[in-house]
Amino acid sequence: MLFPPECKCGARGTCEFRHGRKTCICEKKYAERDGRCTETCMDNADCYNEGRCLDYNGGKFCNCFWGLSGDRCEIIDDCVTGKYKDCREDRGTCRYDSTDKTAVCVCPEGK
């Protein structure tokens, strides 16, 4: 049976229709958040880059600071698609500065 395109639970879930509504049935350690199966957390230590593990609609999920994404706040947006996307190609290291809450490109010594 094919489902409408708006049913996008992601790779960790399947979509079922129950009582006229779409529902994501998620794998263990995943729960539905905003229409897709997202990895859950137990506490703040499960979240990267100072993300916080918070309750949301019956599950616990990492809540990321602005500029971070991914189920565990592991993606630094500016390092992937933003102003520092070429940092690694230039032999730098793109990382998240937790003091300034922003991405920084750290250049090799002498550059």
Image (cartoon, rainbow, N blue to C red):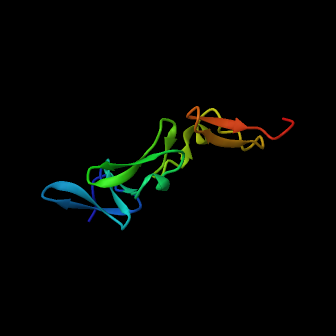
Answer with the quarter of the image where residue 78 lies. top right
Residue at 54 percent of width and 45 percent of height:
49
Q: Give how far across and how far down residue 24 sits, in percent.
A: 28, 59
Decide which of 53, 19 is in the foreground and name it. 53
The one of 61 and 1 positioned closer to us in this rendering = 61
At horizontal 66% and vertical 35% (from top left) the residue drawn is 104
Q: Is residue 59 visible?
A: yes
Tell me: 110 left or right of 55: right
Foreground residue, 25 or 103?
Answer: 103
Seen in the picture, residue 69 relative to 100 is either above or below; the reply is: below
For this view, does 51 lie left or right of residue 14? Answer: right
Residue pushed farthest left?
19
Q: Position of residue 46 (x, y in %)?
A: 47, 56
Q: Position of residue 1 (x, y in %)?
A: 26, 66
Q: Is residue 47 left or right of residue 18?
A: right
* Relative to 53, residue 110 above or below: above
Give percent across and percent down for residue 99. 59, 34
Please identify the residue farthest to the right as the structure is shown.
Answer: 110
Quadrant into which the C terminus falls:
top right
Q: Residue at x 51, y 44 (%)?
A: 50
